[in-house]
Each structure stands twice: as structure tokens, then as C-alpha cells.
């Protein structure tokens, strides 16, 4: 009997107040409690009888929120951003309220067609090759829950193609290989494992850029083929996790194309920058690419999860992934005139994630999204200058919104890392780059400003001095 609209309005007020609190930077980024703090505050069994939503909402702010890491906090510089915006939040509420499930065109026609349209919108906005479009291309885009799922389904399509369909019935038979630069995200190794090809073959990257070396890749593909192995897929990265290195797709593309190898590009982070014409250098060589994925949830003000995967040939993907039990048969599918997104992903069921991308693209406009990206890049440049001007620190690399730095000795970098892990006002993440420990600061939270960056740097310096 509770009034949903009233409780939802209260929830919206709470969120708006939370965002205002985040913007002031007063809240800690990292929670104070150690392991077990939240579990201790919760009962061990579910309630027998229903409770008031208002009470549950209050408990959320009392028990859960204080023990969260605040990814939208201006001092959040760890990992790559996971973005959000009021438009995205509103769309998620509406999608959840409508409660539809779009596994087939016939189970939610508008959900499927909206997704086709927004994937095409985004492909055009990023200036991706026409082949990636649902219309008029032979390919198309689909929303996945993350770059990890995107690479997994791309590998399925690649194995299907490399084996001429035999993979569906015989598995990988120990013959197929997947290759990636030694800086590729760990999700590639995981996807290769799940796809049944075992360890991904890590190809060396150039010593001063950490970008995949096309000559080393060609040598490795040829050497494996010479001993009877079948190179099925190469995964290149635009914006590696540790240092935002950019693999040279324009050179890797022909290496793969000449050898009939599926090239997937993981542009989870950096791909969004191609919204800005001045960063379209990222797209060089994409005409050679079989599949390409970008996380809208990283740098496009769209809440997680929202990765967009495009394929140049949708048939290769759907042939690998399709299933057709009697309970999913319907006239629309049989007509061949519709897309059934169940055949583009691992899960059967799917929420209407296209709605949030639609809301975000309309509410911000491409201009708004470009300005947000340029703002973050300008802040990262500010931070890079601060690092570069500071004695005792080395600017290891700086690309797009990422700044990677270290101290003048590895020992000092590791000590600083330990100190910063206990610092509540900001979060940086450790990594290894060029064989040495480093710290990463990734700018992308919505309330980060020149002031908050300057303050964060003073805190880092103070820890380093101590
Ligand atoms: N690829 C790159 C380059 C990443 O930086 C990340 C995460 O930061 C991933 C893939 C994994 O993305 P997801 O969490 O969406 O699976």
C-alpha cells in the first residue's frame, strides 16, 4: 500500500543530496571500516515479514553508503572511471520500472530496435567504419555488460570462423590460439580460458611505448601456423589499463587480414575519446577490424554496466552464438527480418540497457559528452604538469585522462603506495609500467576540478615528503 511515487521521490532527493555532498569533497573516497564491517551491521537471516521501503532506504544510507568507495567522488583517481549522470540514473529507473526483457525482437520490439538505433548513433558519433552499422552495414552493435563479455563473444565468433563452424560441435581440439599484447587487460586471458583455448599468447610490446609490436605479432602467428596451430584471434587494445598505451591498429590490421585472423579491438577506456575529432587518430586502421568494443560506462556519463560491442559481420557472431529451442521460436525470427540479441551475448535474458544510452546521448548531446572528455583531459594535463615540476617524482606517461608517475626510487614508490592506500581523501591505483612500480591517477569523476586535482596532488606530495 505504500506510495511508490513518494518513496521514489525520497530516494531521488537522497541521491541528489549525496551528489551535492560528493561535489564538496567532504566525504571520504574510501570507507573507514575493514573487512566484515558491513556484514556485522546486517542480520544473518532475511525478514519473515515485509518491511517499509522508507525504512530500507534509511538503512541504505545508514549502513551501506558509509562503507562504499565513492567512484563519483572528485578525489577518485583510481582505476579508470565508472561514469554516471542523472540522465543515466533516470533511464535505469524507468527501465527497471517497465521491467521488460528483450532477448528476442518479439519479446520487446522497441527495446531491440532502440538498441540498434543507439548503437548506430554511437558508431556514427565515434566515426567508426560504416560496416559496423546495423543499417546499412552488414554488421551492427550490441550492448554487453562489459568489455570482458565483449571479448568473450568476439572470441566465440573468431573460433567459429577459424574452424569453419566445426568449433560448435568439436570445441577447440587444442588447435586454436588467441594473441594479445603483454599489456592487454586481464579480461582477455580470462575470456581465452573460458572459450577453451587455454592461455592467451602474450606478444611483446615495444619497450618505450608498451604498444603491441606488429612485427613480433606476425612472426608469432607464422611460427604457430608452421607447427599446425590455428591463430583464431588477435586482441589489440586502445588505451591499456596500466599506461593507456595505444596499439597500432593500422599496422596490426593488415597482419591479421593477410592471415585470415579475427582482430578484436578492446577500446574499453580510450574509445570514448574518438567522440572528439581531435582524437580520431584512435580510429586509424579500424577498417581492418572484425569487432570493436568501448565501455560507455567508463567515459560517457552512462552508468555501469554498458559496453557497446560492434561487429563488422553480424552473421559470424550470430552463427557462433545462436540457439533455437522450440520455446524461443516465433514468426518474427523465422521471417529473418529482425535481430534477436540473445544471439549476440552469453546470457539469454537481457534488460533494456539501450534506454540509458538513449537518455544520455539525448540529454548531454554529443557536444556535451565531448566537452566532458575535454575537461577531464585538461585536468589530467594539469596534474601531469604538477608531477613533472616536482623534484623526487617522475612523470612516467600521460595519455588522455591518465597520468602515471613514480618516485625517484622503487622503494619510495612502494612506500608511497602503502601510505596512499590509507588516505581517505583520494584513491590512486598501483601498477607496473616499463618494469617498475608506478601509481596511476585517472581523471573522470564528474565533480573533479582543477582545485580538487591541485589538492589531491598536495596530499600525495605531503605523503611522499613524510
Ligand atoms: N579492457 C580495458 C583496457 C580495461 O581498462 C578494462 C577495465 O578497466 C577492461 C577491459 C575490463 O572492462 P569490464 O569491467 O567492462 O569488463
Image: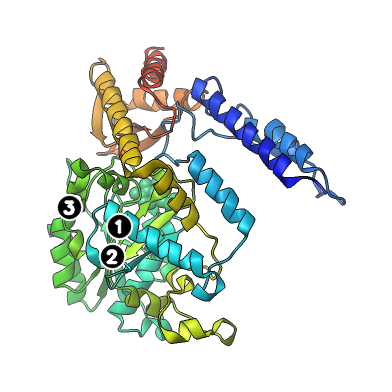
- Judging by the rendered image, the residue that carries numbered circle 2 is 132
Picture coordinates of residue 38, whole percent (x, y): 69, 37
User: Where residue 45 appears, x then y in whole percent?
Assistant: 81, 49
Q: CA distance from mark 2 to mark 1?
A: 7 Å
Rendered position, 54 above or below 294: above
Dividing the picture into quarters, in which one does residue 300 lie? top left
Dot placed on the residue nearer the N-terminal end, 2 or 1:
1
The spot of residue 140 in percent (x, y) is 33, 67
**What residue sits right under mark 1 in the picture?**
123
- Badge 2: how crowded within 10 Å, few (<14), some, or many (20+)? many
Tell me which residue sits at (20%, 47%) in the image: 280
Q: Nearer the viewer, mark 2 or mark 3?
A: 2
- Hey, which quadrant is residue 365 in on the image? top left
Q: Is residue 408 visible?
A: no
The image shows residue 126 at horizontal and vertical percentages of 27, 52
CB within 8 Å, label 2 to label 3: no
Which type of secondary structure does the marked residue at label 3 adopt? loop
Asked whether the residues under the numbered discs 2 and 1 touch, taking CB atoms below 8 Å apart as contact, a structural biologist would say yes
Question: In the rendering, which numbered label is found on residue 248?
Answer: 3
**Residue 139 to residue 115: above or below:** below
Amino acid at each position: 500500500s505504500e506510495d511508490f511515487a513518494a518513496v521514489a521521490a525520497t530516494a531521488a532527493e537522497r541521491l541528489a543530496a549525496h551528489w551535492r555532498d560528493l561535489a564538496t569533497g567532504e566525504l571520504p573516497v574510501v570507507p573507514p571500516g575493514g573487512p566484515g564491517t558491513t556484514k556485522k551491521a546486517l542480520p544473518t537471516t532475511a525478514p519473515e515479514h515485509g518491511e517499509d521501503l522508507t525504512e530500507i532506504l534509511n538503512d541504505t544510507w545508514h549502513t551501506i553508503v558509509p562503507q562504499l568507495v565513492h567512484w563519483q567522488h572528485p578525489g577518485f583517481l583510481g582505476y579508470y572511471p565508472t561514469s554516471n549522470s542523472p540522465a543515466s540514473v533516470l533511464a535505469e529507473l524507468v527501465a527497471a520500472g517497465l521491467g521488460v526483457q528483450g532477448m528476442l525482437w518479439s519479446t520487446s520490439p522497441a527495446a531491440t530496435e532502440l538498441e540498434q538505433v543507439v548503437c548506430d548513433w554511437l558508431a556514427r558519433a565515434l566515426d567508426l567504419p560504416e560496416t559496423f552499422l546495423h543499417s546499412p552495414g552488414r554488421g551492427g552493435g550490441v550492448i554487453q555488460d562489459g568489455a570482458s563479455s565483449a571479448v568473450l563473444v568476439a572470441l566465440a565468433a573468431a573460433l567459429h570462423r577459424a574452424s569453419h563452424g566445426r568449433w560448435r560441435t568439436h570445441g577447440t581440439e587444442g588447435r586454436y590460439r588467441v594473441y594479445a599484447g603483454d599489456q592487454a587487460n586481464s579480461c582477455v586471458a580470462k575470456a581465452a580460458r573460458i572459450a577453451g583455448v587455454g592461455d592467451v599468447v602474450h606478444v611483446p610490446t615495444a619497450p618505450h611505448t608498451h604498444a603491441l609490436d606488429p612485427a613480433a605479432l606476425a612472426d608469432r602467428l607464422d611460427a604457430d601456423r608452421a607447427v599446425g596451430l590455428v591463430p583464431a584471434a588477435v586482441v589489440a587494445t586502445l588505451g591499456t589499463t596500466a599506461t593507456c598505451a595505444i596499439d597500432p591498429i593500422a599496422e596490426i590490421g593488415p597482419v591479421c587480414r593477410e592471415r585470415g585472423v579475427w582482430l578484436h579491438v578492446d577500446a574499453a577506456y580510450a574509445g570514448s575519446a574518438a567522440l572528439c575529432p581531435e582524437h580520431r587518430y584512435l580510429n586509424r586502421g579500424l577498417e581492418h577490424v572484425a569487432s570493436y568494443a568501448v565501455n560507455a560506462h567508463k567515459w560517457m556519463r552512462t552508468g555501469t554496466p554498458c559496453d557497446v560491442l560492434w561487429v563488422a559481420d553480424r552473421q559470424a557472431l550470430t552463427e557462433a552464438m545462436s540457439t533455437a529451442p522450440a520455446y524461443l521460436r516465433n514468426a518474427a525470427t523465422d521471417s529473418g527480418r529482425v535481430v534477436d540479441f540473445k544471439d549476440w551475448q552469453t546470457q539469454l535474458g537481457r534488460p533494456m540497457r539501450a534506454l540509458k544510452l538513449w537518455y544520455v546521448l539525448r540529454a548531454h548531446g554529443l557536444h556535451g559528452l565531448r566537452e566532458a572528455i575535454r575537461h577531464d583531459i585538461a585536468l589530467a594535463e594539469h596534474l601531469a604538469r604538477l608531477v613533472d615540476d616536482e623534484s623526487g617524482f617522475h612523470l612516467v606517461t600521460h595519455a588522455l585522462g591518465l597520468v602515471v608517475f613514480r618516485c625517484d626510487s622503487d622503494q619510495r614508490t612502494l612506500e608511497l603506495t602503502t601510505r596512499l592506500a590509507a588516505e581517505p581523501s583520494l584513491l590512486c591505483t598501483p601498477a607496473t609500467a616499463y618494469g617498475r612500480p608506478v601509481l596511476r591517477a585517472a581523471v573522470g569523476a564528474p565533480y573533479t576540478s582543477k582545485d580538487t586535482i591541485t589538492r589531491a596532488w598536495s596530499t600525495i606530495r605531503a605523503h611522499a615528503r613524510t
